[in-house]
Image (cartoon, grey):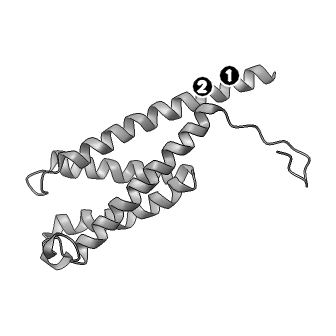
Amino acid sequence: MVIAETGLQQPRKGAVERVFGFFLRILALYALISGLVYWAGLTGIAGDGAWRFDLLALPVRIVFTTLAVLIPAAALGLWLTTRWGVVLWVLAATAEIGAYMFLSDIFSERAGIASINMIGLVVLILMAGATLIERRAARLAAH
């Protein structure tokens, strides 16, 4: 693809980079659904009102409210395949893992969410590494 004003040519995306973009969009959908679940809980729509903001203990309020804001913002960034979206999602996933795995006496134990986030983090790291390797190989082949 040629950029008209500068005459520069954008590098073509490799197969791994296209798969990585697809993975980020799948992760964005998961994050959007997760964020909506937090908002539904905090407003009393889901969970028979048990997750309603005014009924939660202070540490749970802080974590759930932070995640309710952070996760949808990360979903937007992931959908746009931006670095800041990945960073926000990593922060949110790490917070969820910490809350559900290591503070299970305060938070209800939800190992499924922590497991999904851990798998997502591992796949994210592997895909990012494969993308860097692919870019380096393309750069070396071009020179």
Q: Is residue 110 left or right of residue 85?
A: left
Cβ atoms at labels 2 and 1 below 8 Å apart: yes
Residue 8 in the image: x percent, y percent? 87, 44
Instruction: Give the quarter of the figure containing the C terminus.
Output: top right
Whether residue 60 is visible to the viewer of this picture, yes or no, is yes
Whether residue 86 is visible to the viewer of this picture, yes or no, is no
Which residue has dot 2 on it? 133
Which residue has dot 1 on it? 137
Question: Which one is nearer the viewer's eye here, 35 or 94?
Answer: 35
Q: Give residue 56's quadrant in the image.
A: bottom left
Residue 93 vertical placement versus 123 (above, below): below
Q: Is residue 37 left or right of residue 135?
A: left
Check disc 1 and give the amino acid type: Ala
Which residue is pictured at 25% across the width and 78% down the height? 43
Which residue is pictured at 14% across the width and 74% down the height? 48
Residue 26 vertical placement versus 38 (above, below): above
Which residue is pictured at 17% across the width and 70% down the height? 51
Residue 136 in the image: x percent, y percent? 66, 25
Residue 120 in the image: x percent, y percent? 37, 41
Q: Secondary structure at mark 1?
A: helix
